[in-house]
């Protein structure tokens, strides 16, 4: 029987009408990667190796490639990636039912990202080496990837063996504080932290098949966590916010189907409900202003942590900065709330952190989440679909997948069952478009009737490093050279560095508006200027001096 996306969506919605927000029986608790125990990291390594061997890494890289131009630069960005992460995690749990996807709180490393313990042989590996830019250490140091062709994991940092600064924890907290709708938050995050990390690591992370690199999953788990932090920042206003447009300019809402998956956006909104069976280790600490570190039960395990016994060394400021950003138990954006609230003048605090002002000092808990809205037109909208969302065009000789309907092409999540070491997306060797096969480039054009971009050739849609990079050519870490007393004596000892801007090639790849990117970057630069001129000492800024 042919099962369409619309049918699946209707079935999901019928179930939703009975129990609007069904609760998961168990949730995977996603932890910051540095707080994993040795046993948890070993489990992660084993699951990732198994998924690569059985073809699942190539499958998710393929899906991301097929939908690349409809899940970025529009409001599908958050819902699609949350659903994508959950699907990936579900697959991992087929190999080990205790698997939970970690995240990387990368902004704590923003001042000198390459020095992060995460980007080391102990965890996900470091920079690529040699002419092929292969990563030779860490989790995927010996892995062979097979999409879009057989190759090693590649990385090429954007500053030699260093990485230019990301966006600061303070700026990310400011974005969360100043955004009041999902359509405001999405470009704020996508045009800053999201793009910065992809651009910084280069290699596979800079291509549309970036899920090849495990850092993709760590990064997007953190992006998703930040979305949830924002949802809980003001639940009555933010939690069910799903507005904006798709890439064709059509309005989306809670009733709109998520590309590839077919279920409505409303089903992705509530972690621990409706199949979103995960939570984050800091979810209980979400508050309006107060600093709350993780408790032992949801943070690092003292006697088994990858970083050793971190409890006695966390959260210590020396001269206003953290000597080691790896060893904090609170998430970085939560950590800086207390710092900015105590040190910034009231006008500056109100300008950049309106939710942290005295008048907005409110603490929210999960009990403050409002009831799911009743979207009366969902069933009528989905039932009336005769075109619009289609599965990607998969080459006929590519896949034979558990949970995949070869007649229709709709992919459904594998059911939760016992661990299966042989769980695989394919029983035949995967074959992508070869160099000798012809590709209809016209199939990559946007369509007013479809939100799917068919599988591109190996070159189509990839990052073009030869594109003009004039936008970032004049980048400087600091506006002037800092000395031990700051930049001009009136600023902090460790001034906040400028974030590295998007390159022209990166902007073109994502079809971003240059004006939009410049506007958002100008705001980020204004923020850095305000922080430094008001003598604000970022606790995470120490490492940037080593870059100049």
Image (cartoon, rainbow, N blue to C red):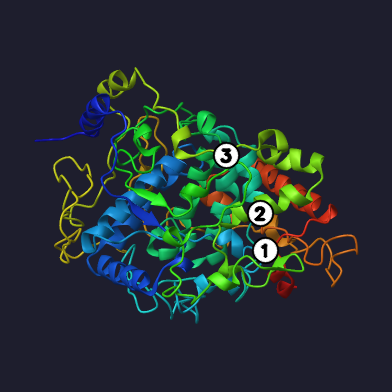
From the image, tell me which residue sits under label 3.
363
Q: Return the residue found at the far right.
A: 489
Name the residue rendered at 39%, 27% in the picture: 372
Residue 515, position in %: x, y? 67, 41
- Checking the image for residue 2, the label placed there is none
Name the residue rendered at 51%, 33% in the picture: 235
From the image, tell me which residue sits under label 2.
336
Instruction: Determine the CA span between mark 2 and mark 1.
Output: 9 Å
Q: Is residue 203 visible?
A: yes
Residue 341, position in %: x, y? 72, 47
Q: Is residue 205 left or right of residue 40?
A: right
Secondary structure of residue under mark 1: loop
- Examine the rendered structure and indicate whether residue 369 appears above or below residue 463: above
**Which one is in front, 206 or 175?**
175
- Examine the rendered structure and indicate whether residue 237 appears above or below residue 322: above
Secondary structure of residue under mark 2: helix
- Examine the rendered structure and indicate whether residue 51 appears above or below residue 523: below
The quadrant in which the C terminus is found is: bottom right
In which quarter of the view is residue 147 placed?
bottom left
Secondary structure of residue under mark 3: loop
Label 3 crowd bin: few (<14), some (14–19), many (20+), radius 10 Å: some
Q: Earlier in the sequence, mark 1 or mark 3?
A: 3
Q: Are marks 3 and 2 in contact (CB under 8 Å)?
A: no
Name the residue rendered at 49%, 29% in the picture: 243
Q: Which marked residue is nearer to the observer: mark 3 or mark 2?
A: 3
Instruction: Determine the CA span between mark 1 and mark 3.
Output: 25 Å
In which quarter of the view is residue 431 placed?
bottom left
From the image, tell me which residue sits under label 1.
540
In which quarter of the view is residue 419 placed?
bottom left
Q: Are marks 2 and 1 in contact (CB under 8 Å)?
A: yes
**Which one is in front, 506 or 161?**
161
Q: Are marks 1 and 3 in contact (CB under 8 Å)?
A: no
């Amino acid at each position: 029987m042919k099962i369409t996306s619309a049918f699946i969506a209707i079935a999901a919605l019928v179930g939703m009408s009975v129990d609007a927000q069904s609760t998961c029986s168990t949730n995977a608790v996603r932890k910051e990667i540095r707080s994993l125990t040795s046993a948890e990291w070993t489990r992660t390594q084993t699951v990732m190796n198994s998924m690569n061997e059985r073809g699942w890494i190539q499958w998710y890289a393929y899906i991301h490639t097929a939908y690349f131009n409809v899940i970025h630069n529009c409001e599908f960005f958050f819902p699609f990636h949350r659903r994508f992460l959950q699907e990936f995690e579900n697959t991992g749990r087929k190999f080990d039912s205790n698997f939970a996807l970690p995240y990387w709180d990368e902004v704590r490393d923003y001042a000198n990202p390459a020095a992060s313990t995460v980007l080391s042989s102990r965890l996900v590996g470091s920079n690529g080496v040699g002419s092929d830019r292969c990563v030779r250490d860490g989790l995927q140091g010996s892995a062979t990837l097979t999409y879009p062709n057989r190759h090693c994991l590649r990385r090429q940092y954007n500053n030699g063996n260093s990485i230019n600064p990301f966006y600061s924890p303070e700026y990310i907290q400011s974005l969360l504080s100043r955004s009041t709708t999902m359509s405001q938050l999405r470009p704020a995050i996508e045009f800053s932290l999201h793009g910065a990390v992809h651009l910084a690591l280069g290699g596979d992370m800079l291509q549309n098949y970036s899920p090849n690199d495990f850092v993709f999953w760590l990064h997007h788990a953190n992006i998703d966590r930040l979305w949830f932090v924002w949802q809980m920042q003001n639940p009555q206003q933010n939690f069910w916010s799903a507005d904006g447009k798709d890439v064709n300019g059509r309005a989306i809402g809670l009733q709109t189907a998520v590309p590839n998956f077919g279920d409505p956006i409303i089903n992705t909104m509530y972690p621990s409900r409706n199949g979103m069976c995960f939570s984050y280790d800091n979810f209980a600490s979400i508050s309006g202003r107060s600093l709350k570190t993780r408790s032992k039960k949801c943070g690092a395990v003292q006697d088994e942590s990858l970083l050793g016994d971190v409890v006695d060394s966390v959260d210590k400021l020396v001269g206003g900065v953290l000597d080691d950003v790896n060893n904090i138990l609170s998430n970085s954006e939560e950590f800086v709330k207390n710092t900015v609230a105590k040190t910034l003048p009231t006008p500056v605090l109100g300008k950049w952190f309106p939710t942290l002002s005295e008048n907005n000092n409110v603490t929210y808990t999960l009990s403050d989440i409002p009831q799911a809205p009743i979207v009366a037109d969902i069933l009528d909208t989905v039932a009336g679909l005769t075109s619009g969302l289609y599965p990607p065009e998969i080459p006929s000789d590519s896949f034979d997948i558990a949970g995949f309907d070869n007649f229709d092409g709709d992919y459904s999540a594998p059911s939760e069952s016992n661990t299966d070491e042989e769980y695989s997306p394919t029983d035949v060797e995967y074959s992508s478009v070869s160099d000798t096969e012809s590709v209809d480039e016209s199939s990559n054009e946007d369509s007013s009737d479809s939100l799917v971009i068919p599988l591109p050739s190996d070159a189509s849609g990839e990052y073009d490093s030869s594109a003009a990079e004039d936008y970032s050519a004049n980048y400087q870490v600091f506006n002037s050279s800092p000395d031990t007393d700051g930049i001009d004596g009136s600023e902090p000892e460790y001034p906040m560095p400028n974030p590295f801007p998007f390159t022209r090639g990166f902007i073109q790849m994502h079809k971003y508006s240059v004006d939009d990117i410049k506007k958002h970057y100008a705001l980020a630069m204004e923020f850095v200027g305000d922080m430094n001129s008001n003598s604000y000492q970022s606790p995470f800024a120490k490492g940037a001096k080593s870059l100049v």
